[in-house]
Amino acid sequence: MSTTPALADRSVGASRPGLMLAVATLGFAVNFWAWALLSPLATTFQTVLGLSAFQQALLVAVPVVVGSVGRIPIGALTDRYGGRVMFPLVSLATIVPVLYLGLLGHDSLTALLIGGFFLGVGGTTFAVGVPFVNAWFPPQRRGFAVGVFGMGMGGTAISALTTVKLVDATSTPVPFLITAAALAAYALLSWLVLRDAPNRPVPASPLNARLRAVLRLRVTRQASALYAVAFGGYVAFSVYLPAYLKTAYALTQADAANRMAGFVLLAVLMRPAGGWLSDRYTPSRVLAVALSVVATGATVQSFTPALAPIGTLAFLAMAAALGAGSGATFALVAQVAPADQVGSVTGVVGAAGGLGGFVPPLVMGAIYGRFQSYALGLVLLGVVAAGALLLDVLSVARRPATA
């Protein structure tokens, strides 16, 4: 008996959600690798181009801000066209700024900012993957599945560990060319392998109408606030922790960077754990524990205790809690958001989390410049985490989030 093309196409992915999850996570990691290419080279560009501290910060911030805000329309487009189209499309689009920065756009601040703006496209893949993965898994497994997909944020570590080394060993274009090749290979792989879930709900209303409807959902507002604290806290520490450790504890740059890598690794590993626990005990319970740990850890660290063991334990506890809280937030989205609006909700919530990560470093820097101490900044983190805990306990846990 011959196999019809329709059946052959269905056999590629219809009964293999694990493969779909693996390929989607790989795409998230590769695109995040590209998204983070400028950050490791910021110090180099500062020296070569004579940039001020503000210009250096702007160079790093532009792709992150664009990637965060861009998740809103990309998530809505994923609801309409599916991940099978959007994953290769976003990956191919990201190749253009990567090649521009590597070959032409690294000789002036203006050129770098233009390239960084369009490099932000790579950061939007998060809003593609969550609805894609969500549709492939039953409700009782979505928290864990979306948490596993979230581990793709570790793609930023690839850039951190390889970009500067490749530039020092060869030349500036090399890491960009390698990343562009990886994006092209992934675009081909995703087009050949990825398939949208059977019976995936496709919205019929226009994009603007869908975005307005999503903003009216309680789950969008709740999850945005919670993710701004959970994932925003993770981003803030991953950006600012080396500077904090060097200033507060007089660590060497290498030692501070290694400790930051440990913080990031633990947070990444705890993200699927947060999703899995949410499948078993509800997202609101996991968030309550995670936010309590963050509030406690920040308060303890505000006294600048000895790094061994209290300071280290405080930071590792916060890393685990922020990772688990991020996973739990999107378990909430996966479980509560209307099936045909998961991408749109993900876009808004993901934007809130990305943008939330750049307020704390600015606040910490300003506070230290004024008081020569980070204590107040950490106290404020504890207060914000406590506020998010109240939102979770009084609102998320007590009533449906779909209204």
Image (tube, rainbow, N blue to C red):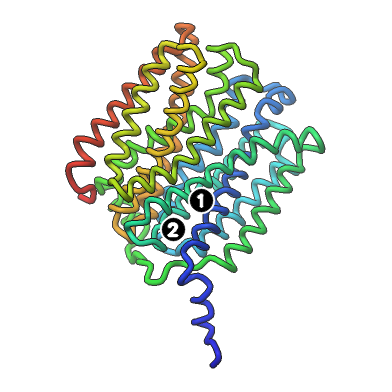
Which label belongs to residue 364?
Answer: none
Please name the residue that numbered disc 2 is placed on.
133
Label located before the other in sequence (2 or 1): 1
In the image, taking residue 311 as reference, residue 276 lies left or right, namely left
Q: Nearer the viewer, residue 2 or 175?
A: 2
Q: Residue at x 41, y 11 (%)?
A: 303
Q: CA distance from mark 2 to mark 1?
A: 12 Å
Which amino acid is tagged 1?
Answer: Thr
Left or right, 140 with reference to 403: right
Secondary structure type for disc 1: helix
Residue under label 1, please give it.
125
Furthest residue to the top? Answer: 371
In depth, the one of 338 and 73 nearer the eye is 338
Give the vertical position of 161 relative to 240 (above or below).
below
Give the residue at x 60% y 54%: 93
- Can you give x and y, in whole percent of width and height, for residue 258 in the image? 61, 27
**Mark 2 surroundings within 10 Å by alpha-carbon count, few (fewer than 14), some (14 through 19), many (20 or more):** many
